[in-house]
């Protein structure tokens, strides 16, 4: 009798162990639900890039991976959602290099004027060894992983008078974001940088509080700044990087297969963003001309010369961890 009871107990234990193993295998190949938040309007390239990544991840996983997207600041401001990704209350967020640089200063190297030649250069940086080194430093410092580096766009200048070189910006009130780097390059270009909230920029231009501003052409269009400006000056002084950032613990909880699917999906999303930005830049010049603005191609060399010292001036942000030549290494990526 005792032997029978023991045999039954063993059988129950084995059955239970089998159930545990089966559950583990099911979980590994089971559904994956992820959240993604950003601050951009659904018409923005960074929302469309997120949609592309979500579609690719779902297709590559045969429907197992589902990414729910919360656009337009539904989950908070950019600083707030980045903090949530680090803490793990959001899985993935979009955050610009300036925002990431506010908590991990080496990233600020990407905000220096004339770091990138164009949007494609940002993509190449994201896949380069120097890019991976920088992203790994951020991951170690904050427990969040950059899974989708791409471009936010090439910043140009709007003005209420012709601008051909830095000397034309003497006394010019240039609206800039309230960030150390933007104020510094505004001064370096010869202007009087005037920090004004983005939502208030249109009225500031309209009322003469600012004489001009600097933004990618897509932002100049979507915010209708062209309605209160006469000139667009193609300075191309900064090409901003932006990132899809994922909580590292969440990433590590996924199988190797699903990690690769996500990485590949967000690479497709990153490429889609650049495709859209390049398309906008080609088409918007004609649009602005149709609105009566004059397009100026300035003396780019004079703007490059005026801002050339900034990487040396701000090298203290990155030189201890990555060397004083980090900016040059990024510029030289082909």
Image: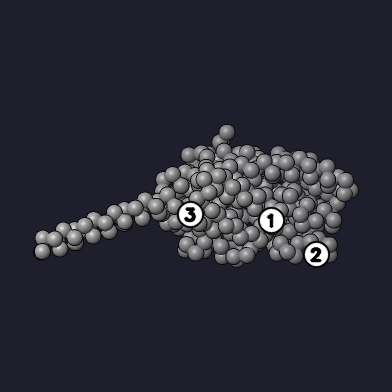
Residue 203's label in the rendered image is: 2
Please name the residue that numbered disc 3 is placed on: 32
Q: Is residue 302 left or right of residue 74?
A: right
In this view, the mark in front (3 or 1)? 3
Task: Point out the frontmost of discs 3 and 2.
Answer: 3
The quadrant holding residue 235 is: top right
Q: Which residue is located at x 41 percent, y 45 percent?
A: 256
Q: Which residue is mark 1?
A: 42
Q: Residue furthest front?
A: 1
Dot 3 or dot 1, earlier in sequence: 3
Mark 2 or mark 1, which is nearer to you?
1
Label located before the other in sequence (3 or 2)? 3
Q: Position of residue 137 (x, y in %)?
A: 45, 50
- Left or right of 322 on screen, residue 280: right
The answer to whether residue 47 is left or right of residue 129 is right
**2 and 1 marks in contact (CB < 8 Å):** no
Considering the image in quadrants, where does the C terminus appear? Answer: top right
Q: Kindly identify the residue that appears in the image at 78 percent across and 42 percent down.
A: 283
Towards the viewer: 169 or 282: 282
76 or 194, nearer to the observer: 76
């Amino acid at each position: 009798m005792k032997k029978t009871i023991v045999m039954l107990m063993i059988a129950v234990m084995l059955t239970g162990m089998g159930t545990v193993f089966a559950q583990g295998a099911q979980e590994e190949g089971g559904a994956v639900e992820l959240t993604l938040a950003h601050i951009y309007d659904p018409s923005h390239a960074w929302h469309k890039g997120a949609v592309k990544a979500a579609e690719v991840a779902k297709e590559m996983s045969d429907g197992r991976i589902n990414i729910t997207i919360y656009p337009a600041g539904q989950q908070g401001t950019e600083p707030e959602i980045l903090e949530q990704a680090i803490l793990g209350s959001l899985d993935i967020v979009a955050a610009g290099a300036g925002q990431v640089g506010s908590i991990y200063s080496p990233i600020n190297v990407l905000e220096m004027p004339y770091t990138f030649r164009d949007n494609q250069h940002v993509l190449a940086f994201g896949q380069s060894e120097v890019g991976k080194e920088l992203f790994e430093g951020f991951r170690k410092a904050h427990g969040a992983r950059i899974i989708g580096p791409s471009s936010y766009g090439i910043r140009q200048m709007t003005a209420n008078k012709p601008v051909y070189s830095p000397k034309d910006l003497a006394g010019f009130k240039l609206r800039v974001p309230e960030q150390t780097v933007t104020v510094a390059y505004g001064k370096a270009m010869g202007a009087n940088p005037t920090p004004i909230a983005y939502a208030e920029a249109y009225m500031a231009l309209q009322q003469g509080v600012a004489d001009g501003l600097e933004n990618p052409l897509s932002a100049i269009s979507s915010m209708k700044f062209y309605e209160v400006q006469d000139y667009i000056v193609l300075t191309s002084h900064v090409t901003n990087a932006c990132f899809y950032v994922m909580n590292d613990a969440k990433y590590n909880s996924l199988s190797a297969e699903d990690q690769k699917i996500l990485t590949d999906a967000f690479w497709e999303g990153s490429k889609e963003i650049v495709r859209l930005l390049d398309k906008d830049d080609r088409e918007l010049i004609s649009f602005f001309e149709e609105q009566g603005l004059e397009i100026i191609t300035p003396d780019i060399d004079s703007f490059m010369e005026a801002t050339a010292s900034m990487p040396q001036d701000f090298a203290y942000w990155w030189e201890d961890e990555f060397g004083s030549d980090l900016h040059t290494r990024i510029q030289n990526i082909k």
